[in-house]
């Protein structure tokens, strides 16, 4: 098993992460497949240390990539790094959950229960 760290090239706020590119890198690493005949390597994938909206310093670890395919490691690290976008200003990331469905109907979601993340 091979792994490598994806390191921030600069200080700033992570403004976005290209999820499509991350998914394609997952296939490259062996975590997904292009055809049904290909096998999936269950130890392959991308582990994130930082997410959109977080402040990072140059040299911080953004993510780690894992694969059984040594020949794709450098390319995967570069592609994951390029999936990150940075901003000088603080970026407000909208909540993924805005409402919940209960027996009483649709109600606003209380974001405070996520404060421990």
Image (spheres, rainbow, N blue to C red):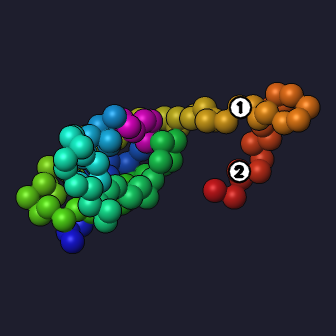
| Quadrant of the rendered image containing residue 47 | bottom left
Residue drawn at x 71%, y 50% is: 114
Residue drawn at x 71%, y 31% is: 98
Residue drawn at x 24%, y 66% is: 3
| Magenta stretch, residue numbers | 14-19
Front residue (pair 16, 60): 16
Q: Position of residue 89 (x, y in %)?
A: 48, 35
Please indicate whether residue 39 sits to the left or right of residue 110 in the image.
left
Q: Secondary structure at mark 1?
A: loop
- Most common SS among magenta residues: strand
Please indicate whether residue 36 sits to the left or right of residue 96 in the image.
left
Q: Position of residue 5 (x, y in %)?
A: 28, 62
Outermost residue, front side = 37
Q: Mark 1: give few (<14), some (14-19) or many (20+) Cα within 10 Å.
A: few
Q: Position of residue 86 (x, y in %)?
A: 38, 38
Name above or below for residue 34 compared with residue 50.
Answer: above
Q: Mark 2: give few (<14), some (14-19) or many (20+) Cα within 10 Å.
A: few
Front residue (pair 27, 39): 39
Q: Position of residue 1 (x, y in %)?
A: 21, 71
Q: Secondary structure at mark 2?
A: helix
Q: Which one is earlier in the sequence, the residue at label 1 or at label 2?
A: 1
Outermost residue, bottom side = 1
Question: Which residue has dot 2 on it?
Answer: 114
Is residue 21 part of the magenta span, yes or no?
no
Residue 98, which numbered label? Answer: 1
Residue drawn at x 32%, y 62% is: 42
Report if residue 65 is visible in the image. no
Name above or below for residue 76 compared with residue 35.
Answer: below
């Amino acid at each position: 098993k091979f792994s490598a760290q994806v390191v921030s090239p600069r200080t700033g706020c992570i403004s976005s992460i290209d999820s499509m590119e991350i998914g394609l890198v997952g296939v490259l690493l062996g975590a997904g497949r292009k055809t049904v005949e290909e096998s999936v390597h269950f130890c392959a994938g991308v582990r994130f240390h930082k997410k959109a909206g977080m402040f990072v310093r140059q040299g911080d670890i953004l993510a780690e990539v894992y694969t059984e395919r040594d020949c794709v490691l450098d390319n995967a690290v570069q592609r994951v790094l390029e999936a990150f976008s940075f901003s000088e200003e603080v970026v407000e990331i909208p909540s993924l959950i805005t409402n919940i469905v209960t027996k009483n109907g649709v109600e606003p979601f209380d974001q405070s229960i996520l404060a421990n993340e």
